[in-house]
Image (cartoon, helix red, strand yellow):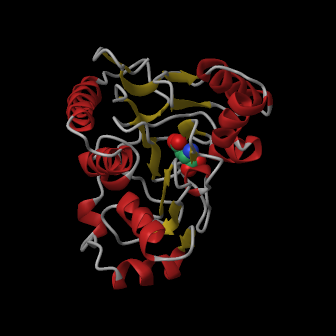
Amino acid sequence: MTAPVLALHGGAGVLATRSYEAEITHLTTLAKRSRKELLAGKSALDTVVDAVADLEASGLYVAGKGSSPNVDGRYELDAAVMDGLSRQAGAVSALTGFLSPIRAARAVMEQTPHVLLVGRGAEAFCDKAGLMKVENPDRYYTPAADPDPRPFPTGTVGAVALDCAGRLAAATSTGGTLNKVWGRVGDTAIIGSGTWADERVAVSCTGQGEFFMRANAAADVSSRVRYAGHNLAAGVQGALEDVARLGGEGGLIAVDALGEVTARFNSPGMKRAIAHADGAIEVAAG
Ligand code: ASP
């Protein structure tokens, strides 16, 4: 039996002027619970989807309930999930009106032959699949974004896990960058850019999505491990340096099939939690 590991993130970027106690408490509880579930035999795929759905519903991060509207006042959300062994993947982008974008992404993966559905097509699919709706967006959403003067202020949630059977999975969900334009698609929903899992690694990114897309950051971690012989930490660092070289800011969480787990960022902080193979839990925001 493999000792399970997992990592969670609640988005890149923190303000020095405010406390993240609620987020830290939430991430700690969720990491402990998710690890317990993995130890009890839950799959990496179920674990990352359930953890991200919990992060979405909490309203504490810029994803799900905590999402901010785009410049037109609409809540357009992105999410993706990938199962490492099967390389099955599902994603939604610019989705409006549904409670859990990550459950919508999973439904795309399991109930269609496609990987990514967007906008009105995604909504029609979610409706048919019977996914839960947001009845009153103005009352449901409680934007969690901090006022942030930098370009492309960010916020996202993600989870990566290795389960007892040695399987890897990654899931990411976001309200996107603040003030994004109508129809904008970020890295979160793009398999390989913001979300990736295969037989070697599982990766979830957060930050200025356009740069993560141009670096194909999440899949780049796997390429570095596979072709350059990097260990997980070096692969993640290399991918992050490529994002930074392009001028981008953000972070990545990753696990590998050997039970390594890491979180790196070049943003001012990243809300995150890691559950190591020996049961140690690390949680931090800055
Ligand atoms: N990467 C996300 C996006 O560009 C935002 C974030 O991670 O904060 O949509």
Extreme residue toward the front, this view: 1
Tell me what residue is drawn at x 58 percent, y 25 percent: 267
Q: Residue, x 56% and y 30% (percent of image)?
A: 251
**Quadrant observed for ligand 1 in the rendered image:** top right
Of residue 142 and residue 98, the one placed in the foreground of this image is 98
Q: Position of residue 90 (x, y in %)?
A: 51, 63
User: Considering only vertical position in the picture, is 59 above or below 116?
Assistant: above
Position of residue 43 measured from the top left corner of the image (x, y, whole percent): 33, 46
Q: Is residue 261 above or below residue 176?
A: above
Q: Quadrant of the C terminus?
A: top left
Q: Is residue 18 visible?
A: yes
Measured from the top left, where is residue 222 in percent x and y?
A: 66, 36
Residue 9 vs residue 256, the one in the foreground: 256
Instruction: In the rendered view, tell whether residue 141 sits above or below residue 172.
Output: below
Is 140 located above or below residue 219 in the figure? below
Image quarter of residue 107: bottom left
Q: Position of residue 1 (x, y in %)?
A: 33, 30
Q: Is residue 178 left or right of residue 275?
A: right
Q: Residue at x 25, y 45 (%)?
A: 58
